[in-house]
Amino acid sequence: MDTGHPSTTPAAGSTAAAPRPQAGEEKLKRSLGTRHMVMIAMGGAIGTGLLVASGNSIAMAGPGGALLAYTVIGFMVYLLMQSLGEMSTYMPVSGAFEEYGTRFVSPSFGFAVGWNYWFNWAITVAAELVAAGLVMRYWLPDVPSWIWSALFLAVLFAVNALSTRAFGESEFWFSLVKVLTVVVFLVLGVLMILGILGGPAPGFENWTVADAPFVNGFTGILAIFMVAGFSFQGTEMIGVAAGEADDPERTVPKAIRTVFFRILLFYVGAIAVIGFLIPYTSPNLLGSEIGDVAISPFTLVFENAGVLAAATVMNAVILTAILSAGNSGLYVSTRMLYSLAMSGKAPRVFTRINRRGVPMPALLATTAIGGLCFLTALLGDGTAYVWLVSASGLAGFITWMGIAWSHYRFRRAYVTQGGDPDDLPFKARWFPLGPIVALVMCAVVIVGQNYEAFLSGGLDFLTVATAYIGLPLFLALWLGHKLVTKAPGVRYEDADLTRNRH
């Protein structure tokens, strides 16, 4: 689509991307519309972190502390989405973060970011399979959970193998269920807060009980930063999906502008409602986890509002959220592996695309990895699985740092090569402050995620290693590629700003 903006820039140096498919070869199909893009980004961030773990967050930091933590992290995600929006509308490619890191930072950085992201979501697929098995115990406790996990993996594979359109449609309906659930929760919650439904209005009683609204001070808020960050992870998927959007210069900016405020409204609104209706001292909040849907804060509020079979309804919604995360995780990790292969950073076999526009070898490999990681939860004591999930969790924040840094260097390169920021299809706000602030905030969350281990009397090496294992893995990928290839960093004047698409 010709928008009147320059399709190339003055320089295209040594970091040019690998050749894309030539005429006659199968390509990724641009079949994702605006509604798919909006729901992919929105659905990626509304999951068990909100539906279940939000109760635990309030128990740890109090209603005020949780609200502040989610608001701050939400603002950080807003800055990241601005950065990603600017790059993905100018250069919508399925590799997104790998491609941007390669072009604007260094090939080694792009290599590390790409494999880090693939690893993140391939392992997340395994985590969601385990969670789905736990949820199914609510209805059929006598059926081994691994049977359900295997069944769901087969379903997710089938949906992704069918076509990109099939993935987009399934994710749209998965996400719609979650969004409607949150909307109903907010409406009922407000009616209960006003005393119109479920008894007398609670007022601000739960915001002043004991140590509320801020429990455990700054340390309590810091502890929730990582949890809030996990909850918002998935919003960056829109950058990968942009490579298959039917009109990325229109759909991506629209999705970014509408999604963030809706997500922030949902999270902040839900935390506020829970804070008004349930005291942070409630043992139900502290114990809320996947296997205990009956004490999910959403379930408790629905029950108090008189919703029939509230636990059953929420269990179905939580299962939908889990399948949605697995579905989108399988999609983005498959596309990332495809992109890594296209740029020569993974075996060439993963560049193959079938007639339906699906990179089938990449999908098969990612599905196999997800299945193997799932098996580690069944074998032995599950220690290997815990390490994998811990490494995966940190990988999301590393990806976000990569987005911020790549955007900073993209804009600098664009201006250095004579581009006018006002000509960009989507212009990020508050540059250069936006990506810098987001980069620093991500670094603070990464470093502070398990600070208690350093403050205790004796340093627990195993605890520290489990929490931070993702960081040395990323650095090993980055430095290892650098040592092997001797690839130099990218200078602004040499950055490849060619707007190619695949």
Image: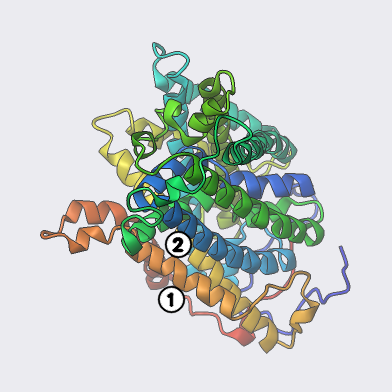
**Residue type (three-letter) at the residue carrying disc 1:** Lys
Residue 478 vs residue 22: left or right? left
Where residue 94 sits, quadrant-wise, is bottom right
Name which residue type carries label 2. Answer: Ile
The relative height of residue 109 versus residue 206 in the rendered view (above or below) is below
Residue 486: assigned label? 1
Q: Which mark is residue 338?
A: none
Classify residue 1 as left or right of residue 352.
Answer: right
* Quadrant of image for the C terminus: bottom right
Label 2 neighbourhood size at 10 Å, few (<14), some (14-19), many (20+)?
many
Q: Is residue 12 above or below residue 312?
A: below
Q: Among all residues in the image, which is located at the extreme left?
A: 458
Q: Nearer the viewer, residue 419 or 319?
A: 319
Q: Give x and y (percent) for residue 334.
A: 57, 45
Can residue 211 be seen here? The reply is yes
**Closer to the camera in the image, 136 or 183:** 183
Q: Position of residue 11 (x, y in %)?
A: 70, 83
Looking at the rendered structure, the secondary structure element under dot 1 is loop
Left or right of 336, for residue 458: left
Q: Quadrant of residue 220?
A: bottom left
Which corner quadrant holds the N terminus? Answer: bottom right
Q: Nearer the viewer, residue 117 or 431?
A: 431
Closer-to-camera residue (158/289): 289
Outermost residue toward the front in this view: 200
Q: Residue at x 34, y 55 (%)?
A: 215
In this rendering, the label closer to the viewer, 1 or 2: 2
Image location of residue 292, percent across then percent down: 40, 28
Residue on which disc 2 sits: 398
